Amino acid sequence: SLSYNLYDFGVRSLTVENARRKVHIYGLQEQQTNLDARKELLARYSNGLKLQKQIEASRAVFERQNTIFRLTKQLHQAGTLGRESIGTAALSLAETLHQQDELKIQLQDALNSLTFYTRIDYHADEVKLDGLVTPQELEPSAVLNDSPEIQIYQEQIKSKNTELMMVKRALLPKLMLYGSHRMFGSDKDDFGRSLSDLNARDASISLIFEWPIFSGFADVAKKT
C-alpha cells in the first residue's frame, strides 16, 4: 500500500520551514553563548586590571605617607611637632597598608574567576595584567538587528506565527492519494499452501478527501 498527501494547504511545507528556522535559532543561540562568554571574560579581566591599578596607586600613596612619617618623626625629635602628628601619620600608614591587603584579596578572587575560563592558576604576586588595547577603528553605530540575541527573538516570533498558521490550516481538509495491491491465497486444509498459492490479486487506487469534523476542541486550544 502507498499513500501520498496531494494537498494540505501548505501545512507540510510550513512544518519543514519551521524546522529549518529552529536549526537557525540553535545556531544563533550558539553565537550568543560565545558572545556572552567573551563579554563575561572581558568584564572579569577588566575588574582584575582595575584592582591591579588600585594596588599600584595604593603603593605609591604608601611610599609618600612613609616619607611623611619619617619626616614627622625627625621634626618631633627636633621639637618642632608634637606626638599627635606622629600618631596621625602612623594611622594613615596603617590604613593604607590594610587597604592594600584588601585589594590583594579582591585581585586574587578576580584571578580565580579567570581560571574558570582558562583552566590556568594565577597568583596575584606573580601575574601582571596588561592594559586593554583600544581598537584603531570603532563602529560609528551599532546595528542592533545584527546581534544574535535580537535575531533569536525575531526568529522565535516568526516561528510562533508559522505554528499558528499550521494550526489554522490543519483545520482545513486534506486531499490524499491512496493505492494498494493485495495478493492472497486460501487452502482450508493447509496453512502453508495458503501462503505458497498467492494467485488471487487485486489492486485499487483512490482519492481520499479528509476533513476532521471534531477533535475534542484540541485544534481550537492550540490556536489560543
Image: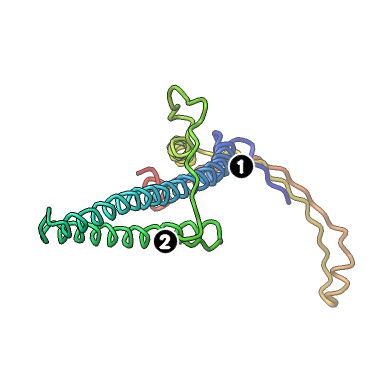
Q: Amino acid under label 1? A: Ile
Question: Can you see residue 171?
Answer: no
Measured from the top left, where is residue 92 in percent x and y? 21, 57
Q: Which quadrant is the C terminus positioned in?
A: top left
Mark sitting on residue 109:
none
Q: Nearer the viewer, residue 119 or 66?
A: 66
On screen, residue 187 above or below 206: below
The secondary element bearing badge 2 is classed as helix
Judged by depth in the image, the label closer to the viewer, 2 or 1, is 2
Q: Amino acid under label 2? A: Gln
CB under 8 Å between discs 2 and 1: no
Query: In which quarter of the view is residue 31 placed?
Result: top right
Query: In which quarter of the view is residue 108 placed?
Result: bottom left
Left/right of residue 149 with respect to residue 8 in the rendered view:
left
- Which residue occupies 50% across, 36% down? 133
Left/right of residue 133 with respect to residue 69 in the rendered view:
right
Query: In which quarter of the view is residue 198 placed?
Result: bottom right
Measured from the top left, where is residue 183 in percent x and y? 81, 58
- Which residue occupies 88% across, 72% down? 193
Q: How many marks?
A: 2
Instruction: Give the colour scheme of this rendering.
Output: rainbow
Measured from the top left, where is residue 119 in percent x and y? 56, 61
The residue under label 1 is 208
Label 2: how many residues lie within 10 Å, few (<14), some (14-19) or many (20+)? Answer: some
The residue under label 2 is 108
Residue extending furthest toward the front: 78
